[in-house]
Amino acid sequence: MSHFHYQDGVLHVEALPLTQLAEQFGTPLYVYSKAALLANFDAYAQPCAGRDALVCYAMKANSNLAILDLLARRGAGFDIVSGGELQRVLAAGGDPGKVIFSGVGKTEAEMEQALLAGILCFNVESIPELHRLNGVAARLGKRAPVSLRVNPNVDAKTHPYIATGLKANKFGVAFDDALATYRTAARLSHLDVVGIDCHIGSQLLDDAPLLEALDKLIELIDTLDAEGIHLHHLDIGGGIGIQYGEAGEADPVPVADYVQRLYARIDAWRAARHQGKPIKLIFEPGRSIVGNTGVLLMKVEFLKPGSEKNFCIVDAAMNDMKRPTLYQAWMEIKPVVPRAGVATVYDVVGPVCESGDWLARERALALDQGDLLAMMTAGAYGMTMASNYNTRTRAAEVLVDGDQAHLIRRRETVAELIALESRLP
Ligand SMILES: *Cc1c(COP(=O)(O)O)cnc(C)c1O
């Protein structure tokens, strides 16, 4: 079931042709499908129905207020990584009581902001962070709910930049240090130790490493129980990977199957060792909620044939979509109105003055100047990583709901970009 499909020779998002959206809003343009977004959220939420579970959308994947608002109304919590993201949750009408705060470098100001807002939990990643949080909570006369991000040392077998659960990694507390760190946390007067979490990496197509991580967390929860430290929740971290459409790519495990397998293990464990006492399960999916809900729409400016390579120069660039140059990510490029005729192999590149400014390499496309292209599966880690490099204004964002298009972020102006700067007196 795709909410992006060709109809009468034109690529559509739900009921709207992308040609129409390009004309109305200009390019480069991010276009999202509301139906796809809600279906992706439901894929996690529905298998958890009737259980004590919370899906905390990892909003760094895409933090547009309209997207947060839709998810909040659907019951989502949020996984934040900065005070700025907390402000976005509040601005979008999200419930701070469903927010968990991840990240290795939380500042005092961010801790204070989150304590005053009344978030659900701080996912703490080091001993100095525990002490800092305890100090801030004491000063405010509050108690901070904490979970430790434990590094289960499981190989997620993903790109090194998005693998986070191994020892040689800045994230989390080493598995072997976790017990001692929990003891420290439990002794601090203004902390409530409530949970455990991990996040072993992103774009995992197979759930085996996640289930392995779950087993390690379960082992630790039992050890802590025996010490009198009783946890209320278990947070399994980010979601399952998604299909980008590259030839030979493995299929991701269906989210519902993954959730069922998690619960099978959790239920067996609780029944065996905890007399059926439930534990709250928290998910932090980002990519699998928004990735396939969005496309980056762009226009062909020039075709530049060469002796070694042919270039298709488009009006989107690495500042709009950083994943290819940052992770060598493969992103699918589709013509909005496919042409008959002979395809040429192009590198699709932007106008930014960097050789690293490429969006796709060696794609066979039949093109003409002025054609529209859609980069598919661009909804996650696209707009949130966009920059103003080369004084390029960031793309506008549109959300499609059936035959309605909503502008959810207008295009920036250069006047806005330079407004924060001053010349010398
Ligand atoms: C990025 C991140 C996530 C989301 O990961 P996805 O692969 O996008 O689902 C979840 N938790 C933490 C702590 C993260 O840093």
Image: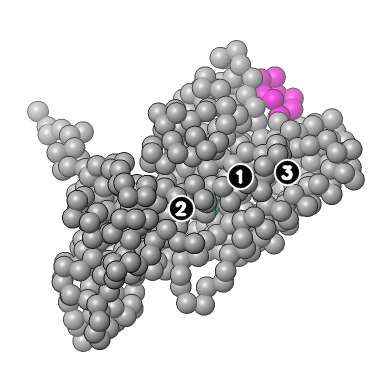
- On the rendered structure, is 251 left or right of 215? left
Q: Position of residue 316 (x, y in %)?
A: 25, 59
Residue 394 left/right relative to 128: left
In this orientation, does residue 182 appear?
no
Please identify the quarter of the rendering in which residue 348 is found: bottom left
**Could you tell me which residue is drawn at 18 percent across and 81 percent down?**
305
Residue 325 located within the stretch drawn in magenta: no
Q: Which mark is first along the chain, 2 or 1?
A: 2
Q: Nearer the viewer, mark 3 or mark 1?
A: 1
Please state, as top left, top right, bottom left or bottom right, where the C terminus lies in the image. Answer: top left
Label 1 CB sits under 8 Å from any ligand 1 atom: no
Marks 1 and 2 sit apart, C-alpha to C-alpha, by 14 Å
Q: Which residue is tagged 1?
A: 45
Can residue 109 be seen? yes
Q: How is the image coloured?
A: one colour
Q: Which residues are magenta?
A: 185-193
Return the residue at label 2: 36
Give the residue pinned by disc 3: 177
Measured as percent of width and height from the top left, residue 205 is found at 59, 63
CA gap, disc 3 and disc 1 = 33 Å
Q: Secondary structure at mark 3?
A: helix
When the figure is inspected, residue 4 is found, relative to residue 191, above or below; the finding is below
Type of the residue with mark 3 = Asp
Q: Residues within 10 Å of mark 1 (few under 14, many from 20)?
A: many
Dot 2 amino acid type: Ala
Q: Residues within 10 Å of mark 2 (few under 14, many from 20)?
A: many
User: Would you say the beta carbon of the disc 3 residue lies within 8 angstroms of ligand 1?
Assistant: no
Q: Quadrant of residue 293?
A: bottom left
* Most distant residue in the top direction: 141
